[in-house]
Image (tube, helix red, strand yellow):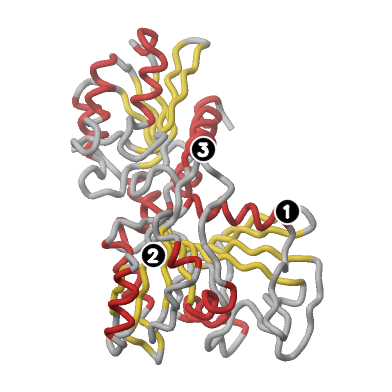
Amino acid sequence: MNKNEALMSKCIKNAYKAKGSTKTNPLVGAAVCTGDDVFFGIHEKYGFAHAEVNAINNAGDKAFKSELFVTLEPCSTYGKTPPCVDKIINAGIKKVYVGVLDVNPKHAGRGISILKNAGIDVEYGILPDKSSILIEDFIKYHRKQLPYVTLKTAISLDGKIAAYTGDSKWVTCEKSRQYVHKLRGECDAVITGVGTVLADNPLMTNRIYKKLGQPARVILDSFLKTPVDLDIIKSVDISPVIIYTSKNIDNKKADLLKSNNVEIIEVDEYNGMLDLESVLKSLYNKGFMNVLVEAGAKVNGSFFDLGLVDKLEAFIAPKIIGGENAVSCIGGKGIASMSQAYTFKSSVMRKSGDDIHITARINDYTKEVIEFTKNFQVE
């Protein structure tokens, strides 16, 4: 790894610190390099200054005639903040190194063109693989018009999520359970099924990582079985609760839930269940870029059967539960042959207390962006 790649790598690492705080904005890291001095900046929070602006501000007068490193093409339009390209030009930056180009059609190479036409030297495609993985949720959000879906499971060594009696507290260790709160805080919404709600009476909130936000709680409930006295309903003041249901429901029950400030959304059914693609499209329209599925075997299986899972967060406890009637983590139709099994684009395995924690990417949205970055030419 050369000097430029090493500095871009540091920008990427820094950008991850804001995960969960940028909403529909991408994670971005930047650095101003002048002589032996390096000044870093990240996009810390939605609606606040972008990474390159923070890096330039941190550098102050030393930004003049310096080099700027940024993981994503600087924005070129007015949004919550002014265009970053203007800040770069006015600061007197002499050269800009970019990880990958922006997938947002409003930008998509426009920022590069503006900088070059202003006489600034621009080099792009620095660590494009890592730079694009950093914004994989952002890529899917803009290219597919759907939120990025992470599915979390917590299982025993023999793949069970509960004993045959239904008892599930607790399969994994405390450290693993704490990390799940972090996953919730980093997403926009948590999706679960009514079966999990009825069995466990969960809150589905982030109660540990206070600097992160609270996700909206989404319940898949075809027949509006959710009681109004459950903890998740009584805690709507913490974060919103949305119930997706079928179009043939008890209007009195719907009105009762609505009177408790629960949002009820009716969607079509697919193979006897709610149409999950319609659910995800609705969440996209609400501005949710990241969703976490924390559910039982039936819902998990449906997401896998439809190919809707982008990333898996699996916690495996060194326990054997056994039992033919004990519930496994993935239900649904499943596959007919091993050649159809889901494989991972990449995976990381680490210890989590006594457990094993596996993070695995299933879908890859980076190729198109990497190619666009590689082949882009300023007209």
The residues tagged by marks 1 and 2 sit, at their Cα atoms, a distance apart of 30 Å
Question: Residue 155 or 87: which is nearer the viewer?
Answer: 155
- Circles 1 and 2, Cβ within 8 Å, touching? The answer is no
Which residue in the protein does label 1 denote? 352
Give the crowd class for mark 3: few <14, some 14-19, many >=20 residues within 10 Å. some
Quadrant where the C terminus is found in the figure: top left
Residue at image location 69% in from the left, 73% down from the top? 168
Residue at image location 58% in from the left, 80% down from the top? 297
Image spot of residue 236 (x, y percent): 40, 60
Instruction: Using residue 48 as the reference point, say whether residue 1 is left or right of it.
Output: right
Residue at image location 29% in from the left, 68% down from the top? 282
Question: Residue 92 or 237: which is nearer the viewer?
Answer: 237
N-term mark: 1 or 2: 2
Q: Is residue 156 above or below residue 345?
A: below
Residue type (three-letter) at the residue carrying disc 1: Ser
- Circles 2 and 3, Cβ within 8 Å, touching? The answer is no
The residues tagged by marks 2 and 3 sit, at their Cα atoms, a distance apart of 27 Å
Q: Is residue 150 above or below residue 107?
A: below
Instruction: Give the SS element for disc 1.
Output: strand
The residues tagged by marks 1 and 3 sit, at their Cα atoms, a distance apart of 20 Å
Which residue in the protein does label 2 denote? 241
N-term mark: 2 or 3: 3
Residue type (three-letter) at the residue carrying disc 3: Lys
Q: Is residue 370 visible?
A: yes
Number of marks: 3
The dot on residue 17 is 3
Residue at image location 43% in from the left, 67% down from the top? 233
Image spot of residue 208 (x, y percent): 59, 48
Residue 324 falls in image quadrant:
bottom right
Instruction: Using residue 214 as the reference point, say whether residue 368 is left or right of it.
Output: left
Instruction: Using residue 318 as the reference point, say whether residue 147 is left or right of it.
Output: left
Question: Residue 55 or 262: which is nearer the viewer?
Answer: 262
